[in-house]
């Protein structure tokens, strides 16, 4: 479990990225931080692997304050997927995926076997193993990024708008792939997005943030859809535009139809 205890982040004298944020991220679930630019969601994500140090408060993993953990060692046991993929252009797909196991002392042969297994897991053809990032499509690059993040079998996976730079069709495929992987692997995922539809599809828990990482609402997708906490949340959901259908990942894998006041107006069976 990840816990944020009254964390804050100030830059200089006047910029407040995070004012006072507390939350619990349950183990083996997907928590989505959703908000517009400047809401502090990426800052919070990067506090988990100490890429950003809080000005105040604490971040704990399984009850341990990570401020006392070596940041390099911490990052090597936490998977991290970013929007651009962050792949090393001079290394092949196989070597990119094998990076963290090699840093942890795994032999080259074993690291490559692990990388090949992960390529299959994330839906990458074996023929891509010797290619370089520039020879891949955007969707393929993101799959490599996910495989690399999983290579050391971390308990925690941080994902910072990982699908934002690909086209809608590829994005839908990657979202479906992530749902499948999470069902199979059961990682503790913190996922950052500004797309509410994506949050509703992926999140077991959704935390909607306003400026300064102030929590506008938190809950499951159906809970938020059925009862938006305020006008900000309703606007973020797009409910002011009238009735819409949003895909929500819940126990029924169904579609919830929501009216303009955020009330669940019905449920339809999932289409093809």
Image (cartoon, rainbow, N blue to C red):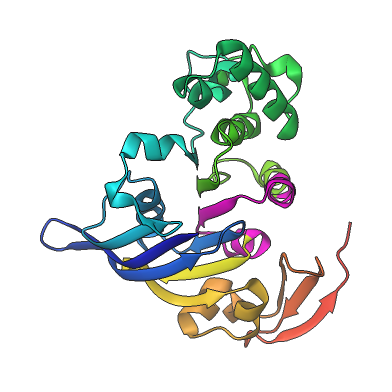
Which residue is at the front of the view, 249 or 167? 249
Q: Main secondary structure of the magenta part?
A: helix
Expressed as whole percent of the image width and height from the top left, the position of residue 37 reads 39, 58
Q: Quadrant of residue 266?
A: bottom right
Farthest front residue in view:
63
Q: Taking 251 as reference, is 191 left or right?
A: left
Farthest left residue in view:
13
Q: Taking 86 as reference, is 272 left or right?
A: right
Quadrant for the C terminus in the image: bottom right
As drawn, 79 above or below 183:
above
Which residue is at the front of the view, 117 or 196? 117
As drawn, 269 above or below 81:
below
Say whether residue 82 is visible.
no
Start-end of magenta stretch: 176-202
- Name the residue at 58% across, 45% down: 163
- Name the residue at 61% across, 49% down: 187
Expressed as whole percent of the image width and height from the top left, the position of residue 230 reads 48, 85
Q: Quadrant of residue 98?
A: top right
Expressed as whole percent of the image width and height from the top left, the position of residue 153 reads 59, 37
Is residue 201 rendered magenta in the image? yes
Expressed as whole percent of the image width and height from the top left, the position of residue 179 reads 71, 51
């Amino acid at each position: 479990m990840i816990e944020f205890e009254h964390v804050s982040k100030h830059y200089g004298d006047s910029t407040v990225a995070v004012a006072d944020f507390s939350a619990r991220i349950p183990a083996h679930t997907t928590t989505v931080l959703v908000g517009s630019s400047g809401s502090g969601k990426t800052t919070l994500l990067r506090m988990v692997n100490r890429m950003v140090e809080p000005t105040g408060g604490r971040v704990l993993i399984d009850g341990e304050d990570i401020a006392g953990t070596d940041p390099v060692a911490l990052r090597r046991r936490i998977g991290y997927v970013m929007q651009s993929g962050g792949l090393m252009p001079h290394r092949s797909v196989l070597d990119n995926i094998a990076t963290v196991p090699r840093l942890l002392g795994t032999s080259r042969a074993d690291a490559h076997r692990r990388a090949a297994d992960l390529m299959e897991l994330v839906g990458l053809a074996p023929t891509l193993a010797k290619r370089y990032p520039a020879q891949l499509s955007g969707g393929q690059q993101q799959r490599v990024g996910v495989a690399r993040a999983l290579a050391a079998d971390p308990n925690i996976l941080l994902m910072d708008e990982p699908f934002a730079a690909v086209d809608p069709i590829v994005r839908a495929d990657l979202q479906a792939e992530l749902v499948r992987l999470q069902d199979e692997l059961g990682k503790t995922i913190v996922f950052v997005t500004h797309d509410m539809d994506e949050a509703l599809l992926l999140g077991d828990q959704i935390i909607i943030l306003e400026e300064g990482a102030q929590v506008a609402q938190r809950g499951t997708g159906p809970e938020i859809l059925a009862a938006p906490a305020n006008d900000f949340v309703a606007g973020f959901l797009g409910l002011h535009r009238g009735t819409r259908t949003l895909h929500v990942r819940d126990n029924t894998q169904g579609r919830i139809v929501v009216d303009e006041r955020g009330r669940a107006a019905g449920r339809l069976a999932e289409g093809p």
